[in-house]
Image (cartoon, helix red, strand yellow):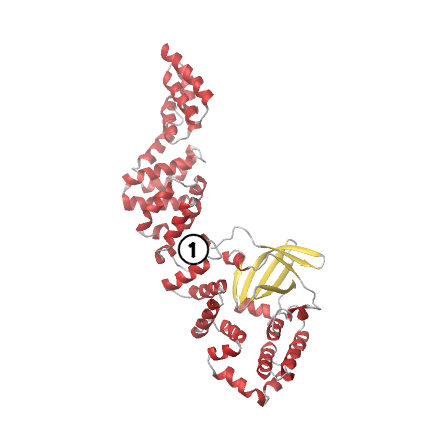
C-alpha cells in the first residue's frame, strides 16, 4: 500500500468566499485533469484543468451519469489521495473560480476556437448541455462561414460525440461537402490524421490506449512534447497490467519520474507493480550512494529496506556503511526489516562477522529503550542466532538485573552498550553496598567523564584517591 505522508491542500476562491480542502482524487484524461477536493466542512469541489491551466470548477453534490467527469473517472487514469503521484500531478495549490458568464469569452483569449469547443464538452457538470451546444454551434458556424470546412467538420464530429442524438449535427455531417474529411478520419493512418488534427488524435489515442498502436502513438507524442509526468502515468498503467517489464523501459521512465518525485516514492510505486529497481537497474545503486555521500542515511536505508532479501550481493558493502549511521528510532520502527538484514549478513558472512552488527543494533535500541524492551525486540534475532555473544549477554543481563549482588557486573554490561545512566545507577548501588570498595567509585568517575560531566567526575576521582589511600 502506497502512503502519502501529507495530503495535498488546495485553496479555492469564489468571489468573496475562500475554501481550504484536500485533494481526495485526481483523474488524468488526455490533456485534462479533474481534481476532487474535500473541504473541512465536507463540501465536494471538482476542478477541471486543461493543459495544466485551471478552467472551471465548483461544488457538486453528485456526479451525473454520462457526464464528462463521470466518464473520465471511469475511463481515465485515476489516483487517490494516498498515491505519491497525486501531489506531483496537482498543477497548483490555489484556484480562483471564474464567473460563469464570462468564462468562454476569456477562454478564447488563451486557446484556439477548436480547443474552446473541446473544453466546453468537459464542463457539462457545471453548465446545461443546451448552453454548451449553443456555444459549440457558434464555433461551427464561424468556421463554416469563413470557408474553413475541415475545422467545421471537426467541430461537428466533436458535437456528435458530445451529444450523439443531436439531429441538427447528424444532418450537417451528412452533407457531401464533408465526405473528403470523413474519409480522412475513417481510412487514414493516425500519423496522417495527426498532421491535420493533433488534438483529436490525442484524445482518440488516450481513449483507445489499451490498443498497442494507439498506446505507442500517444507515448511518442507525450515524450516529444516533454509531458513526462503524463508519459510516466501512461506507462505505469500499462506496466500494472503486465507480468514482465523491459529494463530499458524501466530505466527510461525512472529517469523521467525522478525529475518530479523523490527516489524513495518512485521505488515504492515500482514495488507495487512487482518491480525491484535495485535488481533491474544497476544505476539505482549510485542514487543510494549519492544519498550516503550527502549524509541522507535514514532516507537511503528506507529505500533499501523493503528489498533487503532481494538486493544483489553487490549491495553488502553499502549496507555495512549505512549500518553504523542509522537512527535508532528507524531501527526500532523497522525492527523486522533490520532482523531480515542481519539474517542476510549471517547467511553471507557467518555469525562471527555479523556479531558486531548485532552489537551495534543493540546499542542503537538501547538509546530509546530499557533492558526489558530491548530483550523483547531481540526475540526474533535470538531465534535466528541463539549462539550470538551479544544475545547471550542481553539474556544474562536480564537474569542478574534483580540480583543486588550482581550490580557491578550489570553496570559493566550497560557500560559496554553505552547505556551510561543505567551503568551509573548500578555502580552507585554497588558503592552504597560496599562503601570501602574503590572499584565502583572509579567506574562512576569514568561514566561521568564519558558523559562530559567533569565536576562529578572530579568528585569521584577525589573519593577514589581517598579510598585507595586508606
The residue labelled by disc 1 is 267
Residue depicted at 40% across the width and 66% down the height = 242
x then y, percent, for residue 86: 53, 58
- Taking the image as shown, residue 452 lies to the left or right of residue 147, namely left
- SS for dot 1: helix
- Name the residue nearer the viewer: 354 or 93: 93
- Name the residue nearer the viewer: 24 or 286: 286
- Name the residue nearer the viewer: 340 or 114: 114
Picture layout, residue 107 above or below residue 175 = above
x then y, percent, for residue 375: 39, 36
The residue at the far top in this view is: 470
- Taking the image as shown, residue 348 lies to the left or right of residue 337, namely left
Report if residue 61 is visible in the image: no
The residue at the far bottom in this view is: 176
x then y, percent, for residue 102: 70, 68
Picture layout, residue 344 above or below residue 423 = below
x then y, percent, for residue 3: 49, 53
Residue depicted at 36% across the width and 29% down the height = 413
Neighbour tally class for label 1: few under 14, some 14-19, many 20 plus, Cα within 10 Å: many
The answer to which quarter of the image holds residue 108 is bottom right
Report if residue 17 is visible in the image: yes
- Name the residue nearer the viewer: 402 or 226: 226
The answer to which quarter of the image holds residue 153 is bottom right
Q: Quadrant of the C terminus?
A: top left
Amino acid at each position: 500500500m502506497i502512503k502519502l505522508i501529507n495530503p495535498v491542500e488546495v485553496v479555492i476562491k469564489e468571489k468573496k468566499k475562500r475554501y481550504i480542502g484536500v485533494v481526495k482524487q485526481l483523474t488524468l484524461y488526455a490533456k485534462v485533469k479533474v481534481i476532487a477536493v474535500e473541504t473541512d466542512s465536507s463540501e465536494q469541489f471538482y476542478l477541471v484543468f486543461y493543459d495544466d491551466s485551471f478552467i472551471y470548477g465548483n461544488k457538486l453534490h453528485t456526479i451525473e451519469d454520462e457526464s464528462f467527469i463521470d466518464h473520465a473517472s471511469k475511463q481515465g487514469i485515476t489516483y487517490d489521495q494516498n498515491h505519491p503521484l497525486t501531489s506531483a500531478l496537482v498543477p497548483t495549490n490555489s484556484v480562483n473560480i471564474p464567473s460563469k458568464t464570462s468564462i468562454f469569452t476569456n477562454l478564447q483569449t488563451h486557446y484556439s476556437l477548436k480547443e474552446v469547443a473541446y473544453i466546453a464538452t468537459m464542463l457539462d457538470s457545471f453548465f446545461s448541455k443546451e448552453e454548451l451546444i449553443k456555444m459549440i454551434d457558434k464555433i461551427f458556424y464561424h468556421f463554416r462561414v469563413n470557408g474553413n470546412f475541415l475545422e467545421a467538420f471537426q467541430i461537428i464530429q466533436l458535437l456528435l460525440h458530445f451529444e450523439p442524438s443531436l439531429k441538427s449535427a447528424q444532418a450537417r455531417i451528412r452533407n457531401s461537402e464533408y465526405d473528403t474529411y470523413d474519409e480522412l478520419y475513417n481510412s487514414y493512418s493516425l500519423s496522417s490524421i495527426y498532421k491535420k488534427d493533433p488534438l483529436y488524435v490525442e484524445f482518440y489515442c488516450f481513449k483507445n490506449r489499451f490498443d498497442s498502436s494507439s498506446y505507442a502513438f500517444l507515448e511518442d507524442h507525450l515524450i516529444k512534447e516533454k509531458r513526462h509526468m503524463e508519459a510516466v502515468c501512461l506507462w505505469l498503467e500499462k506496466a500494472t497490467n503486465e507480468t514482465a517489464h523491459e529494463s530499458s523501459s524501466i530505466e527510461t521512465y525512472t529517469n523521467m519520474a525522478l525529475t518530479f518525485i523523490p527516489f524513495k516514492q518512485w521505488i515504492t510505486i515500482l514495488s507495487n507493480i512487482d518491480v525491484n529497481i535495485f535488481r533491474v537497474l544497476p544505476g539505482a545503486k549510485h542514487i543510494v550512494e549519492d544519498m550516503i555521500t550527502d549524509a541522507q542515511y535514514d532516507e537511503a536505508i528506507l529505500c533499501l529496506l523493503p528489498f533487503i532479501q532481494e538486493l544483489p550481493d553487490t549491495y553488502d558493502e553499502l549496507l555495512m556503511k549505512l549500518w553504523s549511521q542509522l537512527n535508532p528510532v528507524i531501527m526500532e520502527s523497522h525492527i523486522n526489516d533490520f532482523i531480515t538484514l542481519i539474517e542476510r549478513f549471517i547467511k553471507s558472512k557467518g555469525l562471527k562477522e555479523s556479531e558486531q552488527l548485532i552489537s551495534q543494533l543493540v546499542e542503537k535500541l538501547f538509546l530509546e529503550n530499557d533492558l526489558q524492551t530491548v530483550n523483547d525486540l531481540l526475540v526474533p534475532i535470538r531465534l535466528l542466532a541463539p549462539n550470538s555473544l551479544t544475545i547471550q549477554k542481553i539474556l544474562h543481563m536480564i537474569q542478574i538485573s534483580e540480583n543486588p549482588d550482581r550490580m557491578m557486573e550489570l553496570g559493566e554490561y550497560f557500560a559496554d552498550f553505552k547505556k551510561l545512566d543505567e551503568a551509573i545507577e548500578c555502580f552507585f548501588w554497588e558503592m552504597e553496598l560496599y562503601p570501602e570498595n574503590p572499584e565502583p567509585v572509579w567506574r562512576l568517575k569514568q561514566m561521568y567523564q564519558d558523559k562530559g560531566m567533569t565536576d562529578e567526575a572530579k568528585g569521584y576521582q577525589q573519593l577514589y584517591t581517598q579510598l585507595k589511600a586508606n
